[in-house]
Image (cartoon, rainbow, N blue to C red):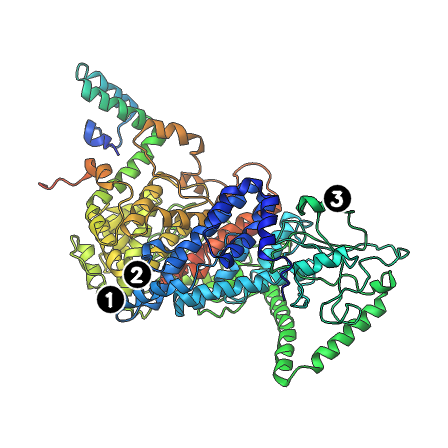
Amino acid sequence: MKNHYARTGLQPDTDAVRIDAALDGVVGDDERHEDLEAARSVLADPERAIHYRRAHLHYRAMAEAVDTLDDPIAIDSHRWRERLVEFLPDESS
Amino acid sequence: MSIPLLPSPAIVLLLAAFAPLSASAQTAITGLASSVRDEVVRRCLPMQYREGADAYRDCVVAGVTAREGGTRGSAGLPDLTLDDRYAIERACAGADAARCMTDQIDALATAPDPYLDALDEDERYAIRRQCFTVQGEGGVVAYRQCLDDALVALDALPEPDLDSLSLLERNTLALRCSANDAGAPAADYRRCLLEATGSDPVVLAAPPARNAADTTDDAVAGAPDVTTVAETAPVPAVVPRTDPDPSRAPDASTAPLDLGDGTSNAEAATPVRRLVLPAAARPDEETNRAPPADGDVVITPQSEADIELVDTTSGLESGGTPDLGERVADVRERLVTTVSAMDQTQRIVLAAALALPLLLLGLWAATRGRAGARAPLTEPRHPIRNPDLVGRVSPGFDGDHTFDGDDTASEHFLGDLDLDDLPPVSAAHEPSPMDPTEPDTGTALGSSPGSSPGSSRGPARAAMHRPSPAPANAEADIPADDTDSRGYAPVFVPRSSFGRRLLGEQSPLAREYATEFLIYWMAYGDERYEPEVRAALLHDGGVDGDPHELIKRHVLEEDTVAFADVVRSLQNGAREVQRVQILDLLMVLLISERAMTPAQNTLLHFLADAFGLGPSTLDQRHEEAFGTPMPALARTDLAAWWDRVESDLPPRWDARGIAELDERAQARFRLGLPLDGDLGESEIVEGFRRAARRCHPHRFDELGERERALAERQFVKFEDARDRLLGEGR
C-alpha cells in the first residue's frame, strides 16, 4: 500500500487543484512527479480520496500492530510487513 | 429402513455408464476401501444429476480428500475444519489441553469426516444444529459420529419434491421447518418438508434379504419391475401414480412380489409397487424398456441406502382407486394395531408427540395475536440467553405483513436486556453507530434515547437506552461477568493507556471491551458518526469514568496504539472460537450484503491473520454470512483497483448517504436488496432470510451478553426492514 500522504507531503484534505499545483512545482523531478501523479489518480477524486483516507487510518493502525503478526497464533497471509512498510511508525518520534 | 438394491460393483458399473466424464473421479476413488468408496459415490451421485458430471467429479474428489484427511489421524489442528477445531477446543478447555488435543486428533483415525457436501445448505445447517451440543461437549469424535448418525437418519428419508412450489413457498416452508429447536434431529427438517408437501415421510420396511440382483431377477421373471440405482436425483423421489386405469389387466404392478422369505406382498402388510427407473437414469441396456404405465411408481435414482418403497397404491389389487371409506378404515386399523403394540412409555411418548403440535399451534396463535406476523417462539435445547430469538431467526411467514409500528415483539425480545447504562451523548438521534445505515449518535453499548422519524421503537426499546448514573470511575463500573471461566487471560505488554486498562480487567470483560473497541474502530473508521457527537466525545468522552464513552473517545482520537493493544489483548485473551465470532459480529453489525467498504475489507483481512484464522476461515465466515467468498484485499492506493470496482460504489459504500435515503431504501439496503426497481415478495423474504441467518444466536454463543445483544438488535432491524418492505409496498 502506498502512503500517498507521506510520499508527496499532501494533506488528507488536499483537492485536485492543489495537487495540480504541486505537480506544476515539481517539473524536472521525475520521481516526485511520478509520486504525485499516482497520488492524483486517487486523491483528486473526492470519493476515492475519502475511502483512501479511511483505509490509510487502518494501515497506520495495522502498522502499529504489526508485531502482533509475530504472535505464535498469527498468520501472515498477505505479507503485511511489505504492505505496511510505508506506514510504520517513526521510531524516533 | 433402507433397501440396498444394488451391490457395490453395480454402483461402479452404473457410475461408468452414467458418468463418462468422471473418469478422474473414479481414478481418485480407486485407492479407497470399498466401503468408503461406496459411500463417496452414494453421496455424490445426486450432484451428477443435479449439476452434471463436472460437479460430480468435484464432489468425489472432495469426498476422497475428506476421507483421506479424516483418516490420517496425524493431522494437526490447522488442517482440520473449523467445526472440528471447535469441537476439540471445547473438549480440551480444561487442564492438560495439549495432551487432550493430541488424543482428540489421534482419535480422528477412527472417525472419518462425514461428507455433507452432497446435501443442500439447509440440511447441512440442520445437521450441524443437531450436533451442536455434542460438538461443544463430546469432543470431535462424538461430533463426527453425531454428524454421521444424522446423515444416516436423513438418508433414510426420501427427498422432498419442492419443484412444484414457488420460490416463496419453498422459502416459507424451509423457514418453518428449520424453526425446530436447536438440537432437533435433522431428519425432522426433511420430515417436515415431506409432510408439508404431502409426501409420505414414513419409510416402509423392506425385507433385508432382498438386494438388487434379486429384484432384477424378479423383473426378468415377470415379477414387478423393480429397478433402481444408487442415489438421489433432483426430481421427485417418488412420483405418485395418477389415475390408474381400472380396466387394465393385472400386470407386474399388481402381481405378488416374492419377498424371498416365503411370503408375497399380497400376504405381507407391506405394500409393493412397481418401481420404474426413468430411462435417462438407467444403464443403456435398460433404456429400451417400455415407459412406465399409469399404475407404476417411478423412482428416480436414489442412494443405495435410500431406496424406499412408498405406499401410493393401496387397493391396487382391485385395479382401481380405493374409496375414502376403505382408506380411512385401513388407516384406523393400522393405527389401532400399532398403538396396541406399544408399551406404556411408548404411548406416553406418542401422546406427547401428538400434543406438541397442538401446543405449538396454540403458542403460535397466542404470539401472533400479540405480535402480528411475528414467528412463533421456540425453546431451544441449547442454553441461549434469549431463546426467543432462535425461533425468530427462522420464522414462519404467512404473507400477511403490515408495518404498523407495532413493536410488541421487539419489546418482548429486548425487554430483558439492559445494556445501555450510559448517559446519552445526543438527545436528537437514535443510537445505532453499529448500524451501517445510520450515522452514529450513540452506541448500542452506550446509546441515547429518542427515536428517528418513522422508526418503530417501543417503550421497552426506549427503556434499553435509559441512562443510569455514571460511576465515579471506570474501574468501579466493571460488572461481574461469569461468561468465561476457562482461564483465558489477556497477557501482553500494553503500550497505550487503554491497553493498560484492558490488562487490568477480568478476562471476559477485557475481551468485551476489546471487542467493543473493534466495533467502534470499524464503524468510526467509515466515519459513521455525527460531527457534533464526535466533537462532544473528543471533548469530554469518558472523563466521568464511563468505559464505553472512553472506548469511543480512543477510537475517535484514532488511537492506533490502543488498536494494537486491543489486537494483542484478543490474541491472548480470547479463544479461537471467540475470535471467529468476533469477526462474525463485525460482519453482522457493520457490513451489509454487497456493501463492504475498503476500510472494512482491510480491517477484516488483517484481523483474520492476527487472530490466527487466516484467509480460508475468513472466506468461510464471509461465505456463511453473505453467500460469497471474502473479496480480495482492497487497494485504495491504486487507480487500477478503483477502475475495477468503481461501478459498485455509492451509495452502498456511503453509510451516511444511505442514512439520508428514505426508509424503504434503507430497508432494502439492510436486506441487501437492490435500491431501485420493483421487489417481489420472494426477494424480500429471501433477503431477510439471509440476513436473519447471520444473526443466529449460536453464531455468537461464545461471546458476552453485550455482544450477543448487539446481534439480536441487528436482527430486530432486519425484521423491521422486512415488515416495512412487505407492508408498505415495494
Residue B372 position in % (x across, y down): 60, 60
- For the residues labelled 1 and 3, say whether their Cβ atoms are less than 8 Å apart: no
Earlier-in-chain disc, 2 versus 3 = 3
| Residue B552 seen in this snapshot | yes
Q: Which mark is residue B506?
A: 1
Tell me the subunit letter for badge 2. B
- The local secondary structure at tag 1 comes to loop
Name which of mark 2 and mark 1 comes first in the sequence.
Answer: 1
Taking the image as shown, residue A28 lies to the left or right of residue B478, namely left
Quarter of the image that includes the C terminus of chain B: top right
Q: Which residue is mark 2?
A: B575
Relative side of B62 to B340, left or right: left
The residue under label 2 is which amino acid type?
Answer: Arg
Callouts 1 and 3 in the same chain: yes
Q: Determine which residue is flagged by label 3.
A: B288
Label 1: chain?
A: B
B100 sits to left or right of B218: left
Mark 1 residue crowding within 10 angstroms, few (<14) / some (14–19) / many (20+): some
